[in-house]
Image (cartoon, rainbow, N blue to C red):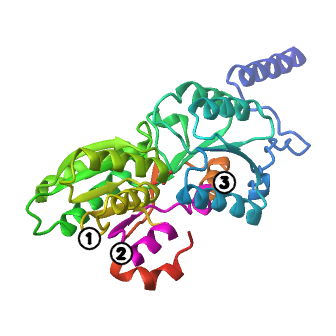
């Protein structure tokens, strides 16, 4: 009886322990360590293979921009696959497709000829895990499709141009200005034109003619010749880049007028060519547009590759230069 009673007590106690979910006895061996994923080493410049899609080689600004990317890639040990699209949009788009398919390329840098038409290749790049950085030119596309845009505030360049043109035309009875436009679909041309128009009313400037000369000196000269044939009642030229302004200066000379005196000339870029023309008195004022963007762009690309979120636009700092200072400043210029 006593034995039966003891067995019953043990049985009841065991049942109670199981029912209450009592903790199992402590394990004798060390608990297994949870497996930690190995920390991913940060990528360096040497891990970057960059597909760079350049617009073309339309002038001094572009040459400086290209040189900046090639030289800096070499200094940093970046593997650069450089593509010159020869100013053809279709070439840029097909190069983009190719870089998307290129297994070695982890970063694509684009200097877009036009603001529109990029969504398809950008989505393809996202699916392929590429980091896209825009340099020089902004585009119209959803911001989640690229890491960042590093380039000038072209609208501000246009506003500064109008303010400076107002100074040049101070005291002039009429303020008729002709505009030489870059390639019309580009952000540089659109935004500079818009910025200029925002401010020109402040001193009564009228744009009497506006036409593209595709960033080229030859076309700038031809377009200016045509303007002068229609009317010589022109007080100022707003050339959206130096080359077109240099071409316009030539056309003005050949028409028997003095560029910089009879017709004031303002250009954008600040290449050495424009500084020399300022020293010669042919160009009056130059608004700077900085092409030496590579160090900033590569740094941003590396950050993005390492998972950092970047601001969607990093504008460059730019100044204005006057003919009176050109001789002193020219030796310090890098392009
Ligand atoms: O996008 C910058 C512009 O492109 C420069 O002002 C012009 O010279 C270049 O071709």
Comparing marks 2 and 3, which lies closer to the viewer? 2
Q: Reply above or below: 334 against 153.
A: below
Q: Which residue is mark 1?
A: 261
Q: Please report contact status of discs 2 and 1: CB closer than 8 Å, yes or no.
A: yes
Is 290 part of what is drawn in magenta?
yes
Q: Secondary structure at mark 2?
A: loop
Q: Answer left or right for 332 relative to 206.
A: right
Q: Position of residue 302 (x, y in %)?
A: 66, 54
Specify the quadrant that holds the C terminus.
Answer: bottom right
Tell me what residue is drawn at x 48 percent, y 46 percent.
137
Q: Mark 1: which secondary structure?
A: loop
77 up-or-down from 57: above or below: below
Q: Report whether the residue tagged 2 is closer than 8 Å to ligand 1.
A: no
Please name the residue that numbered disc 2 is placed on: 281
* Residue 163 relative to residue 40: left or right: left
The CA span between labels 2 and 1 is 8 Å
| Circle number at residue 302 | 3
Quarter location, residue 164: bottom left
Q: Say if residue 286 shows up in the picture.
A: yes
Element under disc 3? helix
Q: How many marks?
A: 3
């Amino acid at each position: 009886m006593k034995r039966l009673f003891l067995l019953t007590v043990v049985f009841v106690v065991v049942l109670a322990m199981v029912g209450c979910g009592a903790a199992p006895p402590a394990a004798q061996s060390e608990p297994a360590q949870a497996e930690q994923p190995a920390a991913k080493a940060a990528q360096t410049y040497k891990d970057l293979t960059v597909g760079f899609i350049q617009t073309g080689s339309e002038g001094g600004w572009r040459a400086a921009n290209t040189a900046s990317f090639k030289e800096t890639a070499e200094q940093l040990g970046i593997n650069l696959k450089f593509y010159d699209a020869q100013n053809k949009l279709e070439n840029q788009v097909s190069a983009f497709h190719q870089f998307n398919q290129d297994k070695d390329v982890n970063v694509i840098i684009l200097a877009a000829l036009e603001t529109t038409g990029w969504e398809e290749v950008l989505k393809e790049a996202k699916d392929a895990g590429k980091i896209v950085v825009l340099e020089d030119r902004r585009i119209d596309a959803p911001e989640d499709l690229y890491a960042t845009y590093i380039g000038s505030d072209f609208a501000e360049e246009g506003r500064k141009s109008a303010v400076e043109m107002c100074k040049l035309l101070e005291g002039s009875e009429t303020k008729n200005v002709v505009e030489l436009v870059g390639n019309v679909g580009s952000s540089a041309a659109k935004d500079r034109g818009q910025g200029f128009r925002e401010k020109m009313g402040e001193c009564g400037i009228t744009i009497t003619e506006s036409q593209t000369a595709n960033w080229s000196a030859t076309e700038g000269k031809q377009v200016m010749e045509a303007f002068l044939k229609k009317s010589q009642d022109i007080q100022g030229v707003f050339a959206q880049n130096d080359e077109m302004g240099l071409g316009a200066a030539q056309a003005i000379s050949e028409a028997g007028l003095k560029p910089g005196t009879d017709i004031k000339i303002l250009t954008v870029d600040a290449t050495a060519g424009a500084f020399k023309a300022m020293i010669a008195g042919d160009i009056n004022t130059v608004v700077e547009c900085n092409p030496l963007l590579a160090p900033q762009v590569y740094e941003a690309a590396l950050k993005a590759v390492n998972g950092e979120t970047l601001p969607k636009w990093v504008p460059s700092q730019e100044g204005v230069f006057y003919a009176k200072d050109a001789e002193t400043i020219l030796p310090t210029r890098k392009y």
